[in-house]
Image: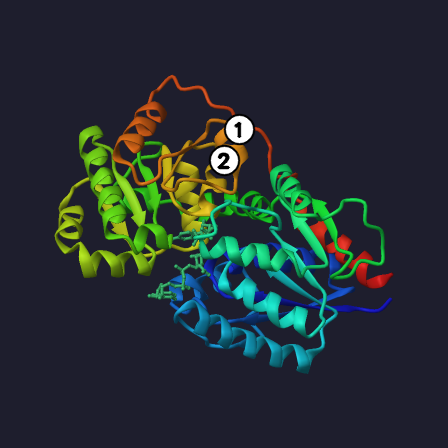
Amino acid sequence: MSTIKLLNIVGARPQIIKSSAISRAIRTGFSDRITGLTVHTGQHYDKELSDVFFDELEIPMPDFNLGVGSARHGRQTAAMIAGIEDVLIEQKPDGVLLYGDTNSTLAGAVAASKQRFPIVHIEAGLRSFNKTMPEEINRIMCDHVSTLLFAPTNAAFKNLMHEGFSPENSPPYTIDNPKIYITGDIMYDNSLYYAEMAERKKAGLLESLEIERNNFVLATIHRDINTDDAGRLERIMSTVKALAEDYRIPFVIPFHPRTMKSLKSGLVSLLADLRKSRYIRIIPPVSYLTMTYLEKNCLMIMTDSGGVQKESHFFRKPCIVLRKETEWIELVTNGTVILADADPALIHQAFEGFVQPDINLDYPGFYGDGKTSEFILREILMLFEN
Ligand code: UD1
Ligand code: UDP
């Protein structure tokens, strides 16, 4: 039996976490048939956005680090494309694995498709229908040069069909004859795998933050629409402060460095007020196990993150999303995610609804059986072994 070589491309926090589900599945069930190599583009470079996940989630260290760092989109993506192209030419993998919708995903899609390496896109088909989001452009472009497209939800699968992908294609699959799948979500695999470990390893965390189980709100804010628009950021953070103080409920907020930079540059007095409030805990970005523990034990989540809103569902917590739209539309239909944009009145209304003690919410299994990574690897083997 021959072994196939897959090149994983990661760069931003959520991709590193996603890749751990695939590397774990290779290690535990496919190591005799699949070799994984990893390129880290260097899009995220701070320890708490990158190294911490390799250490904690036992992900093999990247074989290549392009060290691209932060820059405007064009420059950043161009540097990644050049670096990935060099690795592809040197390594000649059988296929390239791309995750999600960041600039690292787009760079991998351009480099691999031009060099004619088949692309496997994990988290295909998600759409916000808002092309002012850089992620929307990245995901559309990546899907349209992929050979195997793994859509995590029914909605994502339907989006692909609307864009002309056919579920009827038969092998051999190529960039011109791609195969679309509906799978679950590899992040659900991760949450199931790490939930119990988080509970064990992070006991004591609540005491150190002076918060109580099921009596704090976990909030994250990092999307450019919120960080790069001082008006939106000001409205969101003032509303957080008002809710925390009116309801006397602590908010734990692990800030992405981007958000902290925006507060420090344009909203200094608001930042000082937030820091003074006895109900606000502003902390640096946390590790995945810490985040999992906080998600599992909070009362409610408030976020503009894609990954975190889904994790709210995995841990059966209501979630207020600080955007106008979401790619995970089934959560909104289900009533457990409310889109409140950066609108104080909508945020207040959603919060008031979710904080009711007799609230009855349902969390159906939208995201697979926790074995999506294995399914994906089996399908990849079929492509390359036939
Ligand atoms: C990126 C993704 C976004 C994803 C997020 C996950 C794109 C276009 N965006 O957004 O989809 O949700 O990652 O967290 O790919 N910075 C640091 N330290 C770092 C990295 C970044 O301080 O290690 C700061 C820099 O000021 C940088 C800014 O964050 O300019 C933005 O970084 P960038 O990688 O461009 O985008 P993210 O906002 O992190
Ligand atoms: N996350 C983390 N620490 C944090 C914030 C988020 O480990 O301080 C994890 C979170 O649990 C989820 C992933 O990062 O698994 C989501 O990444 P992010 O919100 O940065 O990006 P998005 O999903 O919006 O692209």
Q: Residue at x 25, y 50 (%)?
A: 282
Vertical order, 346 against 119 (above or below): above
Q: Is residue 2 left or right of residue 156?
A: right
Residue at figure coordinates x 50%, y 74% from the top left: 78
Q: Along the horizontal axis of the image, is 362 left or right of 321? A: right
| Residue 206: % across, % down | 32, 42
The CA distance from mark 1 to mark 2 is 6 Å
- The quarter of the displayed image where residue 294 is located: top left
Q: Amino acid at mark 2?
A: His
Question: Based on the displayed image, in which of its 4 quarters is residue 50 positioned?
Answer: bottom left
**Which residue in the protein does label 2 denote?**
313
Please give the name of the residue rendered at 51% of the width and 33% of the height, measured from the top-left corner. Answer: 331
- Residue 250 picture location, percent across and down: 25, 38
Residue 136, given in percent of the width and then of the height, sits at: 51, 53
Residue closest to the far top: 358
Q: Earlier in the sequence, mark 1 or mark 2?
A: 2
Residue type at tag 1: Tyr
> Which of the two residues, 250 or 100, is positioned nearer the viewer here?
100
Q: Nearer the viewer, residue 234 or 140?
A: 140
The circle on residue 210 is none
The residue that label 1 is drawn on is: 363
Quarter of the picture holding the C terminus: bottom right
Q: Are marks 1 and 2 in contact (CB under 8 Å)?
A: yes
State the SS at label 1.
loop
> Does residue 362 lie above or below 135 as drawn?
above
The answer to which of 192 and 312 lies nearer the viewer is 312
Above or below — where is 132 with respect to 217? below
**The CB of the residue at mark 2 lies under 8 Å from ligand 2:** no
Number of numbered discs on residues:
2
Under circle 2, the secondary element is helix
Q: Is 192 on the left or on the right of 220, as rendered?
A: right
Q: Residues within 10 Å of mark 2 (few under 14, many from 20)?
A: many
